[in-house]
Amino acid sequence: MSPPIGVLLAAGSSSRFGANKLLQPLAGGEPMGVMAARHLLTAVSRGVAVVRPDDIELSAALSELGYRVVENQQPESGMGESLAVAVTASLDAGGGWLVALGDMPWIKPQTIVKVAERLAQGASMVAPVYKGERGHPVGFASRWGERLVELSGDRGARQVLIEYPNDLELLPVDDPGILLDVDFPEQLSEAGFESLSGKESRR
């Protein structure tokens, strides 16, 4: 089976962060969203990134990585709308979709590879689990395409996982990064980075 297409959801408003968090620099100055996007590409054949219409800088950075960048014209509608936009733009995904979030840069690339491999091996839906808690990225076989393009709202694909629990395979991993997203600047400081200065501040 062909590898899945990577979907990077990167159209959030960053309202709680106070600035475009996906452009905030992490180790070596790499923006958060670009790091998450680069890690996702370790496991997929190609990537589709969904951004806000006015996010020119992020769009350019993701395009340079090799992503097909598409815009969510209604980003306020939530992650469900963004995922529907991405799947609609890649309905030829014979290997399904591996869905990741732009504000989760600390997922180990090897974890992403493991999730992609299970999808390629025939899993219908698969998600990593760390200490009993489900995280990202989440894989969907191609059979879910029609359901995914119907999504809207902030719940994203969670509604599909709730409706079809018996189709979801949970993959235990030793990776706390599957649970770590960024909503506030202090979370970057706690992780060892100065969130708005662009300077590394290892403690």
Image (cartoon, helix red, strand yellow):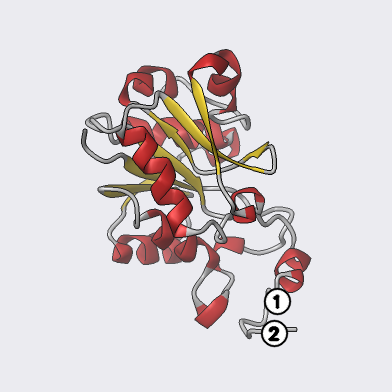
Q: Is residue 18 above or below residue 90?
A: below
Helix, strand or loop under label 1: loop
Disc tally is 2
In the picture, residue 57 is in which quadrant? bottom left
Q: Give the x, y percent position of residue 105.
A: 55, 60
Residue at screen point 54% across, 26% down: 152
Residue at screen point 78% across, 67% down: 186
Q: Give the x, y percent position of residue 77.
A: 58, 33
Give yes or no for contact between labels 1 and 2 (Cβ–Cβ under 8 Å): yes
Residue at screen point 48% across, 18% down: 167
Q: Give the x, y percent position of residue 182.
A: 67, 57
Helix, strand or loop under label 2: loop
- Depth order, front residue of 143/58: 143
In the image: residue 26, left or right of residue 119: right
Where's the N terminus, which quadrant? Answer: top left
In the rendered image, which residue does mark 2 sit on? 201
In the rendered image, which residue does mark 1 sit on? 192
Q: Mark 2: few, some, or many residues within 10 Å (few <14, many ≥20)?
A: some
Where's the C terminus, which quadrant? Answer: bottom right
**Amino acid under label 2?**
Ser
